[in-house]
């Protein structure tokens, strides 16, 4: 059962946002519906386990699944079901999903030529909008991270402090999470699709439905799609206008679409890896600086310990001669006091010099 969502519905309550779907038809007209699980399954013609993947309360990994009648898309904030006739988009009130709805409204209407032939299948136009949005979203997050990270790293290099270290630690944690999202969540999923021709063929819903609307000659004239209109046409112009069900040309056309966005995600990942290397180099530099400071403190401690040992020996001699104990050799030998002081000082200096020379010989202190 599906019904229009109430304008005053509280979407913030747990479980409510997961029921709100924006349905866009082939003309790009959006309709917000409140649909339960059974209604979505009936409308999209998918299995219950495929619908559960889109449940925001569950921790399913990102995926792009081609089914008999639909494509199940779960990438980052985009959770959608794409059929050959319409797009079901979950949680359309999300701030990151609203621009996608607007882009789908602009790109989904059928593009036709003078002979009235359709240029590209509906599911490819919708899939391209989703992939483009994901790539742009991740690239924007990467740019924001770079803008914050590089100045913070330079500041840490010039001044090592707890504040700067904590700032860089937080940036590194955010970078690690973003790399995981780009690498495992998006890049690996696209790579898995590109490695399996059968999985790519499953995305061709229009072809499976028996309507061959994507032809190489028409692809080159498609103005609304930056990938299908330029990337695919370069290969498609050299192919025959005739195509058959499940042909290798179909798979290659899907592959070109996925490969374009795979390259974009790979470029984003390369920028993150470059940032990670910069952070690692900065950490190595900071560790060298800290080791140097630590060594200086150890050297200072060694010098102070040597001085303490020498002064302790001098104090021992002074204490012995300073005791108020009657000894026969104290009589008429007052002149020996100054020689005891001088000899004690020389002994202390000599002991200190011996200790420091031994420490330099062992490399414990600098020359």
Image (tube, rainbow, N blue to C red):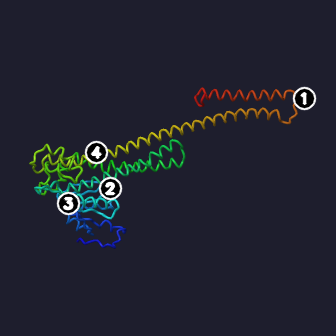
The label nearer to you, 1 versus 4, is 4
Q: Residue at x 65, y 34 (%)?
A: 303
The label nearer to you, 2 versus 1, is 2
**Circle 3 Cα neighbour tier, 10 Å, few/some/many (<14 / 14–19 / ≥20):** some
Image quadrant holding the N terminus, namely bottom left
| Label 3 sits on residue | 109
**What element does badge 2 sit on?**
loop
Q: Which percent across, then down, holds residue 212?
A: 11, 54
Estimate the spatial distance between the alpha carbons at disc 2 and disc 1, rounded to whole Å: 97 Å
Q: Is residue 9 left or right of residue 212?
A: right
The label nearer to you, 2 versus 4, is 4
Q: Residue at x 34, y 53 (%)?
A: 137
**Circle 1 Cα neighbour tier, 10 Å, few/some/many (<14 / 14–19 / ≥20):** few
Closer to the camera in the image, 131 or 344: 131
- The number of callouts visible is 4
**What element does badge 4 sit on?**
helix
Q: Which percent across, then down, holds residue 215?
A: 13, 50
The label nearer to you, 3 versus 1, is 3
Closer to the camera in the image, 225 or 97: 225
| Label 1 sits on residue | 331
Q: Which mark is residue 116?
A: none
Estimate the spatial distance between the alpha carbons at disc 2 and disc 4, rounded to whole Å: 18 Å
Estimate the spatial distance between the alpha carbons at disc 1 and disc 4, rounded to whole Å: 99 Å
| Position of 302 relative to 182 (above/below) | above
In the orientation shown, which residue stands out farthest toward the front? 114
| Label 2 sits on residue | 76
Circle nearer the N terminus (3, 1): 3
Q: Residue at x 20, y 63 (%)?
A: 25
The label nearer to you, 3 versus 2, is 3
Estimate the spatial distance between the alpha carbons at disc 3 and disc 2, rounded to whole Å: 25 Å
Q: Is residue 270 left or right of residue 104?
A: right
Circle nearer the N terminus (3, 4): 3
């Amino acid at each position: 059962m599906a019904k229009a969502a109430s304008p005053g519905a509280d979407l913030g309550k747990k479980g409510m946002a997961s029921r709100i779907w924006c349905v866009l038809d082939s003309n790009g007209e959006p309709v917000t519906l409140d649909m339960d699980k059974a209604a979505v399954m009936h409308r999209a013609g998918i299995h219950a386990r495929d619908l559960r993947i889109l449940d925001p309360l569950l921790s399913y990994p990102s995926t792009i699944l081609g089914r008999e009648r639909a494509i199940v898309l779960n990438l980052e904030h985009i959770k959608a079901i794409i059929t050959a006739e319409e797009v079901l988009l979950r949680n359309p009130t999300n701030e990151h999903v609203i621009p996608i709805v607007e882009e789908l409204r602009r790109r989904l209407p059928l593009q036709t030529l003078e002979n009235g032939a359709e240029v590209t299948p509906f599911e490819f136009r919708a899939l391209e909008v989703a992939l483009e949005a994901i790539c742009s979203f991740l690239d924007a997050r990467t740019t924001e991270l770079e803008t914050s990270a590089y100045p913070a790293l330079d500041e840490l290099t010039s001044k090592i402090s707890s504040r700067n270290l904590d700032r860089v630690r937080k940036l590194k944690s955010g970078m690690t999470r973003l790399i995981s999202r780009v690498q495992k969540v998006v890049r690996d999923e696209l790579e898995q699709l590109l490695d399996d021709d059968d999985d790519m063929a499953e995305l061709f819903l229009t072809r499976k439905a028996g309507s061959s609307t994507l032809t190489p000659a028409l692809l080159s004239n498609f103005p609304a799609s930056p990938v299908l209109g330029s990337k695919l046409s370069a290969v498609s112009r050299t192919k025959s206008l005739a195509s058959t069900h499940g042909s290798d040309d179909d798979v290659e056309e899907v592959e070109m679409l996925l490969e374009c966005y795979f390259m974009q995600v790979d470029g984003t990942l390369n920028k993150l890896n470059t940032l990670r290397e910069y952070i690692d180099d900065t950490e190595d530099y900071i560790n060298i600086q800290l080791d140097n400071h630590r060594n200086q403190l150890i050297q200072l401690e060694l010098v102070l310990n040597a001085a303490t040992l020498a002064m302790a020996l001098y104090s021992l001699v002074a204490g012995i001669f300073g005791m108020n104990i009657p000894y026969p050799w104290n009589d008429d030998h007052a002149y020996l006091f100054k020689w005891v002081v001088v000899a004690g000082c020389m002994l202390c200096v000599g002991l200190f010099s011996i200790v420091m020379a031994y420490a330099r010989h062992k490399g414990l202190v600098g020359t």
